[in-house]
Amino acid sequence: MDMTSLKVTVGYTLRRAQAVVFADFSEALSDLKLRPVQYSVLLLVDQNPGTSQSSVSAALGIQKANIVAIIADLVDRRLVRRQRSPADGRSYSLDLSSAGKVLLSRASQLQSAHEAKLEAHIGASGRSRLLELLERLMHLPSDASS
Amino acid sequence: MDMTSLKVTVGYTLRRAQAVVFADFSEALSDLKLRPVQYSVLLLVDQNPGTSQSSVSAALGIQKANIVAIIADLVDRRLVRRQRSPADGRSYSLDLSSAGKVLLSRASQLQSAHEAKLEAHIGASGRSRLLELLERLMHLPSDASS
DNA sequence: TATTGTTATACTCTATAACTATA
DNA sequence: TATAGTTATAGAGTATAACAATA
């Protein structure tokens, strides 16, 4: 099967590579019963204690309606604590529980190992350049402004 | 919101960049009522006339069960022709119709413009290096073999 | 026995609209 | 009026199991 014309497109190659890396990271986290998105929520809450669900969803580019079940699950598992904000009665204040911090610590070790595996595969300079190029693509001008 | 630790990970940055590029390409194709996966099927069938659904699904990394509706829709729209293979009564032989070739031609122009936009944003050498790095990531050793 | 195409099914991810309570 | 969180819902994308027809 001739795939030459697809393989020279950034969009297609990006999609396939993302799927491989995502699957590899998902597998790495599977023992902790954590999906990548749950890991990213724990990380954000840990580094931004007292943040709100809206802030987390905006930062991750997830609709606020879709973050509800994700955070509710983490709260059910006693990894995230959710308290009504004293300053603003509409929003919650999010923090990690002790168990949440322990689990995040273990997940972060797995993430580091995953990252090291990627770096071993494409080289330190390759990884560095890749991050730079992907970061630029993230800020691609939208169709309206181009 | 502090995002520094997420932004230095290949997995997260790859995921966000892929979403941006995918949305941009989807938007570019929207006038033709084509999704990216439909474009890739048309392209593969055009460059591999007489190929089968199984070959297309394997090449694109899509389960054979999930390619059925995709191809059925393209056949319904008279873009793809599907005939029983004389050599193997189990499989179909796929080809583009004249309308399919015309639509693919228009889609390819949009794809080229999309690709040019990406290249303008990250540079020709950046695009070239990006493709090389993503291609390597696609062949990341699986967990079992590493 | 194995493969092609198919149906059924389920789970995840994503997007929108509408609601409540608070501001 | 606007925002935070919620519910309901629908559309994609993806995965597995099981089947008929054919090899």
Image: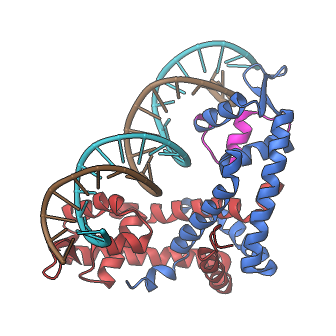
Chain colours: A blue, B red, C cyan, D brown
- Identity of the residue drawn at 72% across and 41% down: A56
Expressed as whole percent of the image width and height from the top left, the position of residue B82 reads 18, 71
Instruction: Using residue B21 as the reference point, say whether residue B69 is left or right of it.
Output: left
Expressed as whole percent of the image width and height from the top left, the position of residue B13 reads 70, 62
Residue D8 quadrant: top left
Above or below, comparing residue A138 to residue C7 in the picture: below
Instruction: Using residue A93 as the reference point, say whether residue B130 is left or right of it.
Output: left
- In this rendering, does residue B1 appear at all? no
- In this rendering, does residue B73 appear at all? yes
Q: Quadrant of the C terminus of chain B?
A: bottom right
What is the magenta range?
Answer: A49-65
Nearer to us in this view, C15 or B120: C15
Nearer to us in this view, A9 or C17: A9
Expressed as whole percent of the image width and height from the top left, the position of residue A127 reads 76, 75
Nearer to us in this view, A94 or A97: A97
Nearer to us in this view, B16 or B23: B16
- Identity of the residue drawn at 86% across and 44% down: A47
- Identity of the residue drawn at 39% across and 85% down: A2
Number of labels in the image equals 0
Above or below, comparing residue B106 to residue B35 in the picture: below
Q: Is residue A36 magenta?
A: no
Above or below, comparing residue B19 to residue D22 in the picture: above
Q: Quadrant of the N terminus of chain B?
A: top right
Expressed as whole percent of the image width and height from the top left, the position of residue A65 reads 58, 34
Residue B58 quadrant: bottom left
- Identity of the residue drawn at 77% across and 43% down: A42
